[in-house]
Image: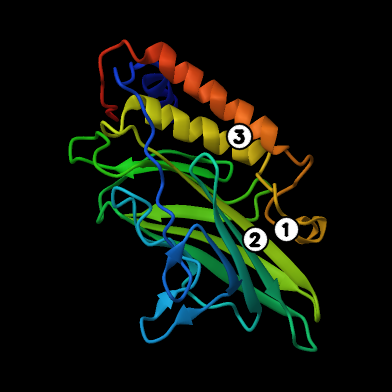
Amino acid sequence: MIAALTLLAATLPASAHAAQFQAGADIFTGTGVAARYVGPGGNAQPSNRALGSIADGGFDTFDTFGFYNTGTGGLALNRQVELLSGNTYRFLDTFTNTTGAAIRTTVNFFGNLGSDGDELVSYAQGGLTVSCEDDGDGSCTGDAVLALVSGNNGLAQATVTADRYNARFALDVAAGQSVSLLNFAFPARDEAGPLASDVALARTTGQALIAAPRVDGLSAAQIATIVNFTVSAVPEPASWAMMLIGFGAAGMMLRRRRPTRVAFA
């Protein structure tokens, strides 16, 4: 079935006026929203909102996304959450064992998706989940199509149930040690609405992040602590820019065709 969905997404024409929306710079900082948050995990009071979580993302794509809803098992959490170029949200979460004994725990990276219980998953393997809001007839509607990336080495166990995204990570952290988890969320949406080309773009971008996670702007020390990705090479920002230009060129080639929404059988 997934192979059929992939073929459908690749062959259906895109919008006559294809243009990607701009994801919202609405990462919660504790006092407001911004394109970046660096600081501790946990919740701000009195709102109880999760620090570093995404409020909406644009077009109601999220109803608060990107935080640890089951706690951290006694580990201290520090977050660096950013909206990078190309509509890519990056979450770098560093867990530090400040005790005198090893800690073994499972943490859950959670997101409430904006589909209100009607999420349609078109692809889920190898650390990548691609999904969208279901219109009730097996088509994408409303929200952006999402590429959710949880790792490339098998540590993450990611699922979408109704409109809830959960990525579970089993951590073993020695006394005094720090380990980091890297997660990405990429929303793809034509301004005219979610189209077949958006499903293809979400999957292609997600697979690129699996193959070469975006670690531009992170220090070598930060990268060395990441445990859910095998980072074989650090992609230069220019390489990602060229890839995005390639996406744009492909979209331009399709602009003269009729708009078609993607449907999943």
Q: Where in the figure is residue 29, as x and y percent of width and height?
A: 48, 70
Q: Is residue 215 left or right of residue 50?
A: right
Picture quarter with the N terminus: top left
Amino acid at circle 2: Leu
Q: Nearer the viewer, residue 61 or 102?
A: 61
Residue 39 quadrant: bottom right
User: In this view of the protein, can residue 189 be seen by the observer?
Assistant: yes
Q: Nearer the viewer, residue 156 or 230?
A: 230
Residue with the mark numbered 3: 208
Q: Secondary structure at mark 3?
A: helix
CB-based contact (under 8 Å), mark 2 and mark 1: yes
Q: Where in the figure is residue 226, as x and y percent of width and height?
A: 72, 58
Amino acid at circle 1: Ile
Instruction: Please tell me whether residue 179 is drawn above or below residue 101 in the rendered image.
Output: above
Residue sticking out furthest to the left: 136
Query: Which disc is residue 226 wearing?
Result: 1
Task: Bin the neighbour count of mark 1 within 10 Å (Cα to Cα): few under 14, some 14-19, many 20 and up.
Answer: some
Query: Which disc is residue 132 wearing?
Result: none
* Structure colour scheme: rainbow
Residue with the mark numbered 2: 181
Q: Nearer the viewer, residue 243 or 120?
A: 243
C-alpha separation, residue under disc 2 versus residue under disc 1: 6 Å
Instruction: Please tell me whether residue 11 is drawn above or below residue 23 in the rendered image.
Output: above
C-alpha separation, residue under disc 3 versus residue under disc 1: 18 Å
Task: Bin the neighbour count of mark 3 within 10 Å (Cα to Cα): few under 14, some 14-19, many 20 and up.
Answer: some
Residue located 57% across and 70% down the image: 107
Q: Secondary structure at mark 2?
A: strand
Residue located 76% across and 71% down the image: 178
Q: Is residue 75 left or right of residue 176?
A: left
Q: Secondary structure at mark 1?
A: loop
C-alpha separation, residue under disc 2 versus residue under disc 3: 18 Å
